[in-house]
Image (cartoon, grey):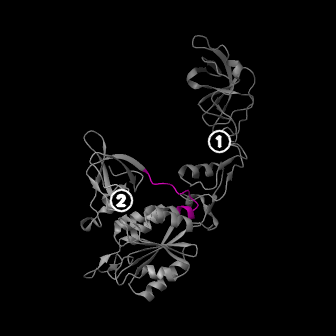
Amino acid sequence: MTFDEAQKAIGAQFKPVFLGEEEAVLLEAYNRVLSEDVISSLDIPPFNRSTVDGFAVKAEDTFGAEENQFVTLKVSGVVNVGEQPKVVLAKGEAVEIVTGAPIPEGADAVVMVEDTERESDELHVFSAVTVNENVMKKGSDIKKGAIVLKTGQVLSSSEIGVLAALGLTKAKVFKIPIVAVLSTGGEVTEPGKALLEGKIYDINAYSLSTAVIESGAKPVYFGVVPDDKAVLSKAMQTALASSDMVITSGGVSVGPRDYTPQIVDSLGKPGIIVYGIAVKPGKPTTVGFVGDKPVFSLPGHPTSALLIFYLLARPLIQRLAGRPAAPMKMVRAFAGSRMFSAKGRRTFVMVKIEFDKDCRLIAEPVETGASGAITTLSKADGFVEIPENEQFVDVDEEVAVVLFRNTAKA
C-alpha cells in the first residue's frame, strides 16, 4: 500500500469506543481529558474587590480633584484582605483598603494610594476617579452558571487553576486507554538482565511506551516474547484481553521466524488490513484489527518503529483518550544537504535542526542506517517528508520539518 492508502484503510476501520469516565483528584488530574462541561456554581470574584492599594470612596466625592487642587475626605475605617467590611461609607468619607479586599458598602471606586496624602484621619485626594475605577466587580471574571471548561479539554496547569478557583477538589475525566507494548525476537533482552553474546537490549518497548504516555495513554509492558508461535500467540491474546490497543515491534519482515502478522490475522476479524507500506523507513509495518482493537506491528529498527508510531498509531491513541488528533508541530527550515528519496516510496528523512551563521534554521540529515540505528533517536529533532514522485530535496531548498518534540534541541 501507499502511505495514503494505509492511512485511509486504518481510518475506515478504526471506530473509537467510549472507554468510560472516572473522577480524578485535582492534583492528579493534570493532562487528563474532561468528560463533561464544568459549570460554575459561584461568581468569581464572589464580591466586588479592590485591584489596588488605596482608599475606597464615592466617586462623586473626588470630582474636581487634581494635581494642584486636592479634595479632602475623612478616613472612617480600614478593610483588610480576607475580612468582611464592618464599615458603611457615608458621603465625604474614605476607607483605607488593600489589593484584593472587599469593597465596603457605600463605596463605588478606589483611589490609588499614590494619588493621596494622609494627615491623621484626613485624606487629601489629588486625582478624581470614576465609578468602578480600580474595582473588580463580582462575577466579572466568571459568572455563576457559566460553562467554564468544555468536554474534551485537556487539563493543563491553567485549567487545574480554574477548577481550584471554583472550589472543586475532583474532575470528571475520560478513562485513560491502556496500550499493551511487547517486543519480539530471540536476540532481544530486557534491560537490567545480563547481556549474553549475540543479544541486544530492548530499546523499542521503552521508547514506544514513553511515546504512548506522551499521546495520553497508559502503556503496559508485556516484556520480550521469543519467536515461538505458541508463546507469541498466547502473549498476544493476553495483551488484547487486557488492553485497548496492542503495539509490537520486530517479527514483521520476511524471515522464517517472523510470525507476528500470521498470528494477528488468526486472532479475530477483520485481521490484517495493512501488510507492508511503501515508505522508508518502516516498509514492513503491519496493521490489523481484532474486533475494535487495533494491533500495530512495527519494525524492529528503533527509528522506524518510533517514526511509524508517530505517523499512524499516535492519532488513534489520542482519539481513544478523547483528545483531538492534534498534528505534530512543524517548522520551516533550509536543507543543509541533499536528501534523497527511495524510488517509489514516500521517504521520511530524519534531521536535526540548528541555526547557521546567518541565523537561518538548517535541517541536517541524521544517519539512520546501520551506524545510526540507535543514536538517531537522540540526535533527530524531527523529519522531512519527501513524496513518492520526488527524487530528492536539494541543498538550501526550503523544507517543512515535523518535530518529534515541541521544541528542538537547537
Residue 300 appears in which quarter of the rendering? bottom left
Identified by mark 2, the residue type is Phe
Q: Residue 323 or 66: which is nearer the viewer?
A: 323
Circle 1 packing at 10 Å, graded few (<14), some (14-19), many (20+), is few
User: Residue 278 in the image: x percent, y percent?
Assistant: 39, 66
Residue 319 highlighted magenta (yes or no): yes
Q: Position of residue 79 (x, y in %)?
A: 66, 34
Say which residue label 2 marks.
Answer: 348
What type is the residue that disc 1 sits on? Gly
SS at mark 2 in the image: strand
User: Is there CB contact under 8 Å for labels 2 and 1?
Assistant: no
Q: Is residue 393 visible in the rendered structure shown here?
A: yes
> Can the viewer see residue 216 in this picture?
no
Residue 321 painted magenta: yes
Q: Residue at x 74, y 27 (%)?
A: 89
Q: What's drawn in magenta, residue-wise?
A: 317-329
Q: Nearer the viewer, mark 2 or mark 1?
A: 2
Q: Which residue is mark 1?
A: 82
Q: Earlier in the sequence, mark 2 or mark 1?
A: 1
Q: Kindly report the secondary structure that dominates the magenta region of the rendered protein.
A: loop
Q: CA distance from mark 2 to mark 1?
A: 59 Å
Q: Nearer the viewer, residue 399 or 101?
A: 399
Residue at disc 1, secondary structure? loop
